[in-house]
Amino acid sequence: MIIASVETMNMIYSDHVSDVLIQIRELDKTFISNGNRVEVLDGVNLDILPGDSLAIVGASGVGKSTLLHIIGTLERPTAGTLLWYGEDVFTLNDEQLAAFRNRKIGFVFQFHHLLPEFNALENVMMPGLIARLPKSECLDRAEAILVAVGLQDRLQHRVGALSGGEQQRVAVARALVMEPDVLLADEPTGNLDPRIGRQIHELLLRLNQEKRLTTVVVTHNLELAGLLSYQITIKDGKVVRLPGNQT
């Protein structure tokens, strides 16, 4: 990846456009608060390549989660383009966009958002059932990914019978069950104690390295950020790449 200097850069571009998985160009996001315009993102440019692991860091309120939500098509930008595989995904209608998210993007949030009335296996099956895959396939996929994240002994446990770290592992498994191209995580260890948080860090890193799973993480945790390939922050609405663990 070819990067301009940190001092002058307001974009991160690849020299090989055909290799780019996610391409962001001149992206703006403005909110209206009490009648005032608040520009959170202002002309953001960013390329994310297959297999990248990227941490978005910085103070609260600079736009980290907003950028992640736009990348994940949960929010639409005010202006600019978001290309996946060279296609502008925001030309899709809401139903098409939901189907795209279900198949291409896995989400992990600070709070696991599991369904308490179901067990671990049933929670992980949900994205496949929503996509109308055969139930047997959903079951096989869910069991395999739960085993992969170390929960082979917890398949039939309901959410309330799982520890906080186990619940977050179920959330990671649910995010991966559709074999997405990208894993997006928003403060995935912010609600866990440091020891369990490090286990989740190691899991995310292993998935990125072994599966070349493109991973984008919003975090205040500098230990987690340092494990990923590179870090960016948002300054005056624009993306700036930080020095550190860069490939």
Image (cartoon, grey):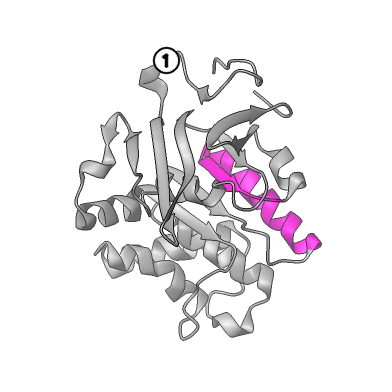
Say if the magenta span includes residue 3. no
**Residue 140 appears at what percent x and percent y?**
40, 63
User: Label 1 belongs to which residue?
Assistant: 16
* Residue drawn 51% across the image and 74% down it: 120
Which residue is at 47% across, 58% downward? Answer: 175
Q: Please, what is the three-letter code of the amino acid marked with disc 1?
A: His
In this figure, what is the number of numbered marks? 1
Q: Specify start and end residues of the magenta stretch as a single range.
A: 194-220
Q: Find residue 153 and report its horizontal and vertical position in percent.
A: 62, 73
Tell me if I can see residue 12 in this picture: yes
Relative image position of residue 142 (x, y in whole percent): 44, 64
The part of the image, by quadrant, that contains residue 23 is top left
The dominant secondary structure in magenta is helix
Q: Nearer the viewer, residue 163 or 216?
A: 216
Asked which quadrant contains residue 231, the reply is top right
Q: Is residue 180 visible?
A: no
Please report the residue visible at 27 percent of the width from the left and 41 percent of the height from the top. Answer: 89
Quadrant of the image containing the N terminus: top right
- Relative horizontal placement of residue 189, taking residue 67 as reference (left or right): right
Would you place residue 158 above or below residue 235 in this image? below
Against 95, residue 181 (above or below) is above
* Left or right of 8 on screen, residue 245: right
* Horizontal relation, residue 120 to residue 218: left or right: left
Who's the residue at 64% across and 53% down the image? 60
User: What kind of element bears circle 1?
Assistant: loop
Corner quadrant of residue 164: bottom right
Q: Residue furthest right?
A: 195
